[in-house]
Image (spheres, rainbow, N blue to C red):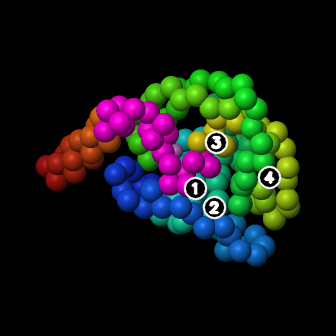
Amino acid sequence: MAIREILTVPDPRLKEVSKPVEGPVTDELRALMDDMLETMYDAPGIGLAAIQIGVPLRIIVMDLAKEGDEPAPRYFVNPEILETVEETQPYEEGCLSVPDIFDEIERPARCRLRYMDYNGNLVEEWAEDLYAVCIQHEMDHLEGTLFIDHLSRLKRQRAIDKVKKAKLRKIREDAA
Ligand code: NI
């Protein structure tokens, strides 16, 4: 396993639409998912889409276990949202590709999913609460959409500027 670099805004790759995985879940894909999970734990974060490490495939990893609990990794290959409920819930979201920015996003409270898991089994289930928030956030990444794209243009630009400034500051500090 290896920790990969996480892309941050305004990297244009984050706007790419990811392609479906063709064929079964192979060992090569499992190795990619292992790297994604390790990268996500290291960050630390609770969800990561493959495009966030520059791989434009429809793959997501997630772990919603509370701190101190046993790790509970989840893997999603070619996930699809089959239906959502009308009821929405607000949640203060963040993203490893938009570090240190948090804002409230309103999304459907529950959604029904279909995906292949780590072993290539087809799973269909309902997601609710944080699971529903996280899978919808991660699935947005597969379409090249970031959570800040749900905010006003002004808020989005401010977020991107803040991340850019922090990156420049870090480059200067590292050079000093
Ligand atoms: Ni994200």
Q: Residue under circle 3?
A: 136
Location of the N terminus by quadrant is bottom right
The earlier-in-sequence mark between 1 and 3 is 3
The earlier-in-sequence mark between 4 and 3 is 4
Answer above or below: position of 10 versus 78.
above
**Residue 58: image tag:** 2
Label 1 residue near ligand 1, CB within 8 Å: no
The reply, left or right, for residue 157 in relation to residue 77 is: left
Residue 141 is inside the magenta segment? yes
Asked if residue 40 shows in the view, the reply is yes
**Residue 142: image tag:** 1
Residue drawn where x is 72% and y is 25% of the image:
87
Along the line of sight, the residue nearer the viewer: 44 or 59 = 59
The answer to which quarter of the image holds residue 68 is top right
Q: Secondary structure at mark 1?
A: helix
Q: Which residues are magenta?
A: 138-157
Along the line of sight, the residue nearer the viewer: 7 or 40 = 7
Q: Amino acid at mark 3?
A: Gln
Q: Residue under circle 4?
A: 114
Q: Amino acid at mark 2?
A: Arg
Q: Position of residue 33 (x, y in %)?
A: 65, 61
The earlier-in-sequence mark between 2 and 4 is 2
The answer to which quarter of the image holds residue 75 is bottom right
Cα distance between the residues tagged 3 and 2: 13 Å
Q: Position of residue 91 (x, y in %)?
A: 58, 26
